[in-house]
């Protein structure tokens, strides 16, 4: 049997309750799994269903109705032999029209086939034991065509050609059912009759463990007896609420809703799993689900197209809530107006936004998700978020979402945990379904309903909010049953391909990448993997997991290791190996530090380098200290060499570009642990949960120079595109001189990490002949350097092999300085920020 998921078709695994192969007679009975939960708004669905009937007429050449009652859409190519395969054995995805397989049981009832919700409400496909006939063979070929001088082979070719044409067709979406009034205006007098049928809201929820369920909320005065739901044989609860007599929706926009269930754990009120908005009332702890469906005139309309996918990624990692300079929770609107222009000015081409999915615990940094389809209400409404993304697109920035499909909040009141009163609804039961370090629940990726839920979630954010891709969080935890905890990966392939690998999770990641790239070819996926899983960034069709980039997490950890040592103990070979140790043809996003290093309990690179001197000696009107001079110099060098050698993309967490002096400490009260110990809080203060952008902008502080250098780095990459150049050659890693020289693209990078020695007439190898010039200099006074490099000098190459390069030229290499040289071939100016 094959299920359709918004254009993705994959075979299912028969459950123990459905192993019989008998053909079910009715449309409703042959559904393997019914529609999953969410609120489906129906508008004149009777007309749409009528249009569906016409579109699927049995005489129509574009579709055929099988004996089982299923609608077979040309191009399905269903292989019934795959129905016995396990999820870990199967990855058969076909990215076609989202309506490629539609359940006939929907026809004539309330379900809407088109519209913004369509891809969430997804069953269909073929029921087990159904008679599956090829759509092409069912197309009628009349006898009189065969007698017109055509041979059998010519007839077969004609049929084959027609079949190919049919497979390329798509079924037009149903209309709104209003054109009849244009054809015959007198019918408007009877619109109440013509429009009455099946207009309202359908709510479905998958909760197989529940014994009884009812929809409650402000709309029915929380009366549990008013809207009791019915359950089908697959654990899906359903109710249809017709519109009010005046045509208004039965559930008002902005009103509270919950589902009450009688479960094995007792009566339980839950927020619907597919809720699109959830808020926390003042003074309350649990969140309330909000029915969010504003009138058409109030919905945000996107005005700007997505920017073209950049060849190289320069990512600004951001958290909307803490993006204000004030100790408050910032809003989507303020981020749109204040932070996005800053990101653009700094030279980044992508913004990666954290903590989008609703999370009841603010201090979780957004990683303990409670409501997967709802944007965080702390920062504004769903339409506010859409406005933010639209503005980013106007500025030419792509917007990546930090999406969490690796685990879920442990909350039972407002999350998915114990949703139907059991611990095995969306998650593995027992210890396998619990992450002991994160105190969170772990999804069962072998369950089709879980796969549907998460795949729909990925499409939801790309389609409805126009995100341009995802950074998938916690992928290492997903791919291994040990979750990467207390495991050291050495690169031995037995560590990746053995019993410790969660094959279901890997297949889910393949499905997710295939769906994302199939429906949104320009979308970008980045996986947070520290294990180095082979094939992680190889396309699906080539046998890989399908990510575009791996987040190169090891680099940041290695920098911290080095920063704990004296300068004299740094080894240039170790630095180069750390930055270049990645798999062939698998792209990486490199970073020297991310939000992880900025959290309380850890230290940013700037703080490791300068410590408490940052509080007293960053003003330009007072003398610096050796610690400050060293810190600023190495801060710039570390970031540039990471961008230069570390990967095909680069990431920076907001504020770290100028060496933000404060760590991140979310507001929190004292917390008493089960063993009686008390973890002290910070009196619920927001003082350390903000970003002091004003420091980087202040012309009287040394932070300004660090920010200017980061801006210079980004613009250098924009001009020369060195991160994605195929040419990369490391010509020198001299341990005695503490010098690293490498070529990337047309550029030659020279790093002198020596703490004291500067080198005059220092010869460096190069590939291209001619003249070179300085295009970036960390010692520039604009960047708080000491102005030891002459930017007007020209450097002429000499023929002859040096450091395995065919040519070379002489430079001055001051201590703790990085200089980038480019061939002179146009009028490009040096990068001054």
Image (cartoon, rainbow, N blue to C red):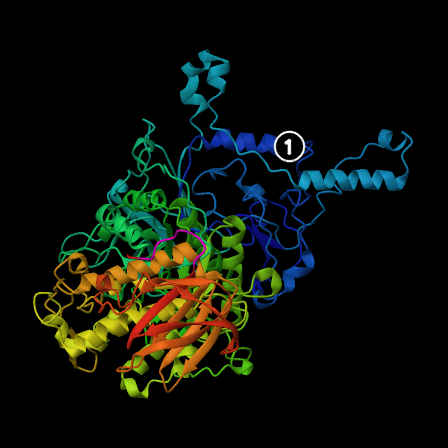
Closer-to-camera residue (669/642)? 642
Would residue 88 appear left or right of 698 to someone viewing this image?
right
Quadrant assignment, res 412:
bottom left
Quadrant in which the N terminus appears: bottom right
Looking at the image, is 179 positioned above or below residue 793? Answer: above
Residue drawn where x is 36% and y is 76% of the image: 761
Label 1: how many residues lie within 10 Å, few (<14), some (14-19) or many (20+)?
some
Residue 310 position in % (x across, y down): 44, 53
Q: Name the main secondary structure of what is drawn in magenta.
A: loop
Residue drawn where x is 52% and y is 50% of the image: 521
- Residues in magenta, as a range: 824-831
Q: Is residue 100 visible?
A: yes
Quadrant assignment, res 552:
bottom left
Looking at the image, is 702 positioned above or below residue 801? Answer: above
Question: Mark 1 — residue?
Answer: 57
Q: Is residue 83 magenta?
A: no
Q: Secondary structure at mark 1?
A: loop
Closer-to-camera residue (251/657)? 657
Residue 99 position in % (x across, y down): 56, 42
Quadrant assignment, res 40:
top left
Residue 193 position in % (x across, y down): 43, 22
Would residue 560 appear left or right of 802 to someone viewing this image?
left
Which residue occupies the extreme top position in the image? Answer: 186
Closer-to-camera residue (425/310)? 310
Looking at the image, is 790 positioned above or below residue 298? Answer: below
Closer-to-camera residue (674/380)? 380
């Amino acid at each position: 049997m094959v299920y359709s998921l918004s254009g993705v078709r994959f075979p299912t695994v028969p459950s123990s309750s459905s192993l019989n192969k008998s053909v079910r007679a009715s449309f409703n009975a042959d559904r393997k799994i019914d529609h999953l939960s969410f609120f489906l708004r129906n508008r004149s669905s009777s007309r749409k269903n009528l249009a569906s009937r016409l579109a699927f007429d049995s005489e129509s050449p574009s579709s055929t109705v099988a004996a089982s009652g299923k609608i077979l859409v040309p191009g399905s190519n269903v292989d019934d032999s795959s129905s016995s395969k396990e999820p870990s054995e199967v990855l058969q995805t076909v990215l076609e029209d989202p309506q490629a397989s539609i359940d006939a049981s929907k026809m004539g009832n309330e379900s809407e086939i088109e519209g913004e919700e369509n891809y969430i409400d997804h069953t269909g496909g073929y029921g087990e034991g159904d008679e599956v006939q090829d759509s092409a063979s069912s197309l009628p070929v009349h006898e009189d065509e065969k007698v017109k001088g055509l041979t059998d082979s010519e007839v077969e070719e004609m049929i084959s050609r027609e079949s190919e044409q049919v497979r390329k067709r798509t079924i037009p979406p149903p209309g709104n059912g209003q054109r009849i009034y244009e054809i015959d205006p007198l019918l408007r007098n009877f619109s109440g009759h013509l429009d009455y049928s099946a207009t309202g809201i359908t709510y479905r929820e998958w909760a197989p463990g529940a014994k009884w369920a009812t929809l409650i909320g402000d709309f029915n005065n929380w009366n549990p007896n008013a809207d009791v739901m019915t359950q089908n044989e697959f654990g899906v609860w359903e109710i249809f609420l017709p519109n009010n007599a005046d045509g208004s929706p039965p559930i008002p926009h902005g009103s509270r809703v919950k589902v009450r269930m009688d479960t094995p754990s007792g009566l339980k009120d839950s927020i619907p799993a597919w809720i699109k908005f959830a808020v926390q009332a003042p003074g309350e702890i649990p969140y309330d689900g909000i029915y969010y469906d504003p009138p058409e005139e109030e919905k945000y309309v996107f005005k700007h197209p997505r920017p073209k996918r950049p060849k190289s990624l320069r990512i600004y990692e951001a958290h909307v809530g803490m993006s204000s300079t004030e100790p408050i929770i910032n809003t989507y609107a303020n981020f749109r107006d204040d932070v996005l222009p800053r990101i653009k000015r700094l030279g980044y081409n992508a913004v990666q936004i954290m903590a989008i999915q609703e999370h009841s615990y603010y201090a979780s940094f957004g990683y303990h998700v409670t409501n997967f389809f709802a944007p965080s209400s702390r920062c504004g409404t769903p339409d506010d978020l859409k406005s933010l993304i639209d503005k980013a697109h106007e500025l030419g920035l792509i917007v990546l979402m930090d999406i969490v499909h690796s685990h879920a909040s442990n909350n039972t009141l407002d999350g998915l945990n114990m949703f139907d009163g059991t611990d095995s609804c969306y998650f593995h039961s027992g210890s396998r379904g619990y992450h002991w370090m994160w105190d969170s629940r772990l999804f069962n990726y072998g369950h089709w309903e879980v796969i549907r839920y998460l795949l729909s979630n990925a499409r939801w954010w790309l389609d409805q909010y126009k995100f341009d891709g995802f950074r998938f969080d916690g992928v290492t935890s997903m791919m291994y049953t040990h979750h990467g905890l207390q495991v050291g990966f050495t690169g031995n392939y037995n560590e990746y391909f053995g019993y410790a690998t969660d094959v279901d999770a890997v297949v889910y990641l393949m499905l997710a990448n295939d769906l994302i790239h199939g429906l949104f070819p320009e979308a970008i996926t980045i996986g947070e993997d520290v294990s180095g899983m082979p094939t992680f960034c190889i396309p699906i069709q080539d046998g890989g997991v399908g990510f575009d980039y791996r987040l190169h997490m090891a680099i940041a950890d290695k920098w911290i290791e080095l920063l704990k040592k004296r300068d004299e103990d740094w080894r240039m070979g170790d630095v180069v190996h750390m930055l270049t140790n990645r798999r062939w043809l698998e792209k990486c996003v490199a970073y020297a530090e991310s939000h992880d290093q900025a959290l309380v309990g850890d230290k940013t690179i700037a703080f490791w380098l300068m410590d408490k001197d940052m509080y007293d000696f960053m003003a330009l009107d007072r003398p610096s200290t050796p610690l400050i001079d060293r810190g600023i110099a190495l801060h710039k060098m570390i970031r540039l060499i990471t961008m230069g050698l570390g990967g095909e993309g680069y990431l920076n967490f907001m504020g770290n570009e100028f060496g933000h002096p404060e760590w991140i400490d979310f507001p929190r009260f004292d917390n008493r642990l089960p063993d009686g110990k008390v973890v002290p809080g910070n009196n619920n203060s927001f003082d350390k949960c903000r970003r002091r952008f004003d420091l980087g902008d202040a012309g009287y502080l040394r932070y300004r120079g660090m920010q200017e250098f980061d801006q210079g780095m980004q613009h250098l990459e924009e001009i020369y595109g060195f991160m994605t150049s195929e040419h990369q050659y490391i010509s020198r890693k001299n341990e005695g001189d503490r010098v690293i020289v490498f070529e990337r693209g047309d550029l030659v990078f020279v790093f002198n990490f020596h703490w004291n020695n500067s080198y005059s007439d220092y010869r460096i190898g190069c590939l291209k002949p001619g003249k070179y010039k300085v295009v970036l200099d960390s010692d520039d006074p604009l960047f708080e350097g000491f102005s030891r490099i002459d930017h007007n000098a020209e450097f002429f190459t000499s023929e002859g092999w040096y450091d395995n390069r065919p040519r070379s030229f002489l430079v001055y290499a001051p201590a703790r300085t990085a200089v980038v040289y480019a061939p002179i071939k146009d009028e490009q100016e040096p990068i001054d920020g």
